[in-house]
Image (cartoon, coloured by chain):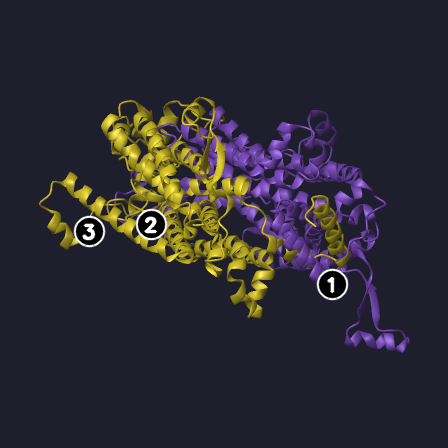
Chain colours: A purple, B yellow
Amino acid sequence: MSDQPSADNAEVRQRRVPDSPESLKAPERDDVRPTSDESDMDAVLQDEDRMERLTKAIPQDKGSLGEFADSMLEALPPRWRNWVVRGLFTVIMISTFTFIVNRGATWLMFLVFLIQFKCFQEIISIGLAVYRLYDFPWFRALSWYFLLTSNYFFFGESLIDYWGIVLKKDNFLHFLVAYHRLVSFALYCIGFVSFVLSLRKGYYMRQFSLFAWTHLTLLLIVSQSFFIIQNIFQGLIWFLAPVAMIICCDVMSYMFGFFFGKTPLIKLSPKKTWEGFIGGAFSTVIFGILLSLALYNRPFFVCPVEHYQIDSSNCTIPLAFQLQDYPVPRPFSFFFKILRKEPVIQLFPFVFHSIALSLFASILGPFGGFFASGFKRAFKIKDFGDVIPGHGGLMDRFDCQLLMGTFVMVYIHSFIRVPDASKLLKQIMTLEPQDQLNIFNLLQSELSKNGLL
Amino acid sequence: MSDQPSADNAEVRQRRVPDSPESLKAPERDDVRPTSDESDMDAVLQDEDRMERLTKAIPQDKGSLGEFADSMLEALPPRWRNWVVRGLFTVIMISTFTFIVNRGATWLMFLVFLIQFKCFQEIISIGLAVYRLYDFPWFRALSWYFLLTSNYFFFGESLIDYWGIVLKKDNFLHFLVAYHRLVSFALYCIGFVSFVLSLRKGYYMRQFSLFAWTHLTLLLIVSQSFFIIQNIFQGLIWFLAPVAMIICCDVMSYMFGFFFGKTPLIKLSPKKTWEGFIGGAFSTVIFGILLSLALYNRPFFVCPVEHYQIDSSNCTIPLAFQLQDYPVPRPFSFFFKILRKEPVIQLFPFVFHSIALSLFASILGPFGGFFASGFKRAFKIKDFGDVIPGHGGLMDRFDCQLLMGTFVMVYIHSFIRVPDASKLLKQIMTLEPQDQLNIFNLLQSELSKNGLL
């Protein structure tokens, strides 16, 4: 996902028309919808040169580990050196991640928050560079203010139950919970008014652009990391399996592409091949099945977090992880008949969920990567940052994870999640007494009809 | 809200440095964070000139009514002519609106949809002009595709109950309801993949910009018009009163500003004055109280739409519109004692809600207008379009309505709405039998504790 766009640049430069006041002034004409004519090509070249100048400040990965480590690696040829650095940091990342997973949901949640902050910072930095607003400290602060506000908005409603006990003791904090939406809106309005008041003549366009940029980044990062945290609460496996699938797909596509790759897949990422794409998809589906077989009977991974954290012995394994009999379809059932066995197989539904998730991870996941690489090309950068030596910025690693997290959330919502009984009861208690009685009576008649009473 | 930025332009042009290849080439230097030095000022001037050229295609209001009507108005001086056109179209808009309100919620809903489409089109047109993508028909279609997708997403969940009876008959439509979130996500993914596949080398930056532009427009227009429709369903008054308040505030601020205006309020809109702002706020609060007194006992306006449309005689007036005794606070209670009356006054809670709403409309509402006028200045346009002669585009009239609609939604959610009993029952019936029994037993014990059983 870190293909160098330098080849393209060289090509663009060759075709570049020398600057002349005429070509730069842009002709005054009534038809302001330029087609792909000469002057439009000029404009494109100008845009690209300008962008390259502007984003020069974005730190790029150099595969460097500091003077000491670099001097030790000096003996290796540069290509190998990069591989060592990349491999080393892959190991470091995976072991840190394993450590945090074993600590449980709360640690994982904080990890997601940390990643969210860093990704936000990486994208906002690009915006600040492009719109030349680095020197508006008050305006930069506003972006971070919006990050906090939107986090409060998104996490307020869902984490309330999780932190409920702490918050009920304190009146002020209770207010933040009970009027969560109103407080979020008020906080947003403060930011909005500050933005309007901070507008400076001559900078309108840039300020509006960065305001838009901030909002889109929030939409992309905060909402999707919120979905990922919701998945964690549904059970660690709903977070772990998708993350592992994306990584597996990345690695295996690379491997298949490296050994068998011939047919180019998409112009945007010239190194991607159909062979890698298909090989990656196959491997990911198989990996997904193996992973679900390895984890399905471990309550730590499959129990919803609320239940497990309160009393780990009390968790009833959710239906998706309980073994069920599935009839074997026609051609295969023949073997069972030979062995004089019932043509049924014992499986748990998550195996099928796992296949659905891994298909998404391997077919649509890569588009997250294409999108990110197109984005980087648009801004003439190679990486989003340099925080992980050998890999680039955090966004370079998490581009596909975000879309995947959203899919898992939608999937859980559509096929897995049932309303929470205790939450429903709480809602009923807020109704008028007459309505409470109505619900009671209707429920009574329904339950007796079904023979439960 | 339609101040001409032409004075600013003239000023900017005077300070303009003549084009020279040196100044346009932009110096190659390592420090790419330009401060407010000479070259930055150059860049600002370039940006502004360029923007003015690009947005020349946006249709602007000319206060023209076609040749026939124009020739009839020719006798009047131009200033008066503009007033006649503006006044005429104000009358037309208000009478159309009154007609539609009297038709009820469904007509109003379609009006909101219509306005939403037109506003979307106005903003997207600016984006197409700015990013010179008018000639990418496939890419323009994508914006409209996203509009439909997001409408399905937003309205799916809430209008399902409304259209429920129609949909249950048809299996395919029922699928669209039951798996609403999954279908929305799938539709979105199709759009996302199409976007990635439509990326064309050399146009990356513009295509990403317009993609971002589309998403922000959707966020602004679709989500907020969804909130406004939700308000309609809560009872027509929750839609009507806020809309009327914003209009009242606009008109009265103008009047007060015209007659008493001296102290300028904000640089962004040089015609706005503190006198207008304060006078407008006072008038709006009084207007809000009068309006609520006029409407509070009419079921057509105060009943939630679901109840009223099914059986208009069956609607129990919501609590907010039922008269209640309020004790009169200390200094005023003295008069009641003189008259030997109980110091209580009969009022309905909506009067207080109305004060809250009108304060928001008159204090924060104008910021919606400032934002819109800053936006128009950034893009060097006077109006968003020319659909209403004398007024400009639809967005010019609805800039403050959107923010107000969101506030009303948040307000209803925080202080008015209670969970819907029939929805809760439906949710309970989707639970496992064991959980249903649990809820039943807990509800039984709660109800007997409160003496209701």
Q: Tag 1: residue type? A: Ser
Q: Quadrant of residue B108?
A: bottom left
Checking the image for residue B65, the label placed there is 3
**Contact, mark 3 vs mark 1 (Cβ under 8 Å):** no
Question: Which badge, 1 or 2, is on the more N-terminal residue?
Answer: 2
Query: How many angstroms separate mark 3 from mark 2 (CA)?
Result: 30 Å
Q: Position of residue B151 (x, y in %)?
A: 48, 54
Q: Tag 3: residue type? A: Leu
Neighbour tally class for label 3: few under 14, some 14-19, many 20 plus, Cα within 10 Å: some
Q: Please give the chain letter of the residue carrying mark 3.
A: B
Secondary structure at badge 2 equals loop
Is residue B278 depicted above or below A362 in this figure? Answer: above
Q: Please give the chain letter of the residue carrying mark 2.
A: A
Q: Quadrant of residue A94?
A: top right
Mark 2 = which residue? A34
Q: Please give the chain letter of the residue carrying mark 1.
A: A
Q: Tag 2: residue type? A: Pro
Mark 1 = which residue? A448
**Contact, mark 1 vs mark 2 (Cβ under 8 Å):** no
